[in-house]
Amino acid sequence: MKRRPIIAGNWKMYKTKDEAIAFIYAVNLSVPDKEDVESVICAPAIFLRDLVKREGENLRIGAQNMHFADEGAYTGEISAPMLKSYGVEYVVLGHSERRTHYHETDEFVNLKVIAALNNDLTPIICVGESLETREAGTTDAFVAEQVKKAYQNMDAEEALKTVIAYEPIWAIGTGRTATPAQANDAIIAIRGVMADLYGRDVADQIRILYGGSVNVKNVDNLVAMSDIDGALVGGASLDAEHFLTLVKAALVKTRT
Ligand code: 13P
């Protein structure tokens, strides 16, 4: 099963406006053809308009969060229709930093995924276990629960429009990457959950990324794995040269 790889940078709360724009100009002409690799930068909301305006043919822009309501009295929040109206195409949902610091629940994540799909945005749904859960040997069960809750009230056609990112919390920003085998095994288990929910065909088609201390040194071994369809990258995506190396590494998926 051929699945087009995705390399998505998650800038988190980094860069100023000028730095963000300079990055886009630095990578625009060098990212691979979008038919081969989806290259995405998920930037702080305040930069989205400036970045979408400057994105080249092969670069796409995503947000890092949004509200689940289309509009309403939610001071400080941003809705899916707002993102869509600015030409944003992806949105990271349920990142562990949002679950931890802002108490985002699986129920909220589910509502956000549905809102993203209703507004034609591609949700990148983050799941992943804590170190405690991994050491207790209950990773697969924990992640399966997160996945099932994220996909409540969604049919197969909708599920196929989503992307999952497996991001073990212990690997995020720690320099401690999951081994390619650990990441691949967890992703195979997630595909199993999708097969239970939607059938093997959907499970084989849906893109599932790995995230957690991915860098230019370890990316090749990660994307070489059978079930890893690319990466969601924090720190290493802030540097234009590194980002280009990461997106080019994913070409191995297209060529094999
Ligand atoms: P790092 O690549 O900095 O570990 O961050 C991973 C992440 O959280 C991407 O969403």
Image: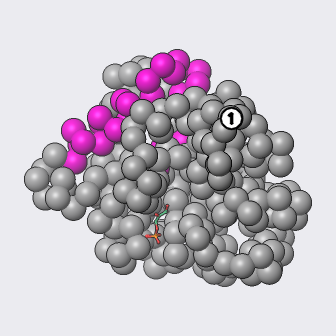
Foreground residue among 48 and 213: 48
Foreground residue among 25 and 99: 99
Q: Is residue 152 above or below residue 73?
A: above
Quadrant of residue 61 within the rendered picture: bottom right
Three-letter amino acid code of the residue under disc 1? Gly
Q: Position of residue 2 (x, y in %)?
A: 56, 40
| Label 1: element kind | loop
Q: Is residue 95 above or below residue 43?
A: above
Quadrant of residue 237 within the rendered picture: bottom right
Q: At x 66% / y 38%, what residue is drawn?
A: 73
Q: Position of residue 51 (x, y in %)?
A: 81, 64
The residue that disc 1 covers is 72
Foreground residue among 70 and 243: 70
Q: Which residues are magenta?
A: 139-167
In the image, taking residue 228 as reference, residue 45 lies left or right, namely right
Residue 249 lies in the magenta-colored region: no
Q: At x 70% / y 59%, what residue is drawn?
A: 45
Q: At x 41% / y 73%, what residue is drawn?
A: 173
Can the viewer see residue 194 in this picture? yes
Residue 153 lies in the magenta-colored region: yes
Q: At x 30% / y 48%, what residue is drawn?
A: 186
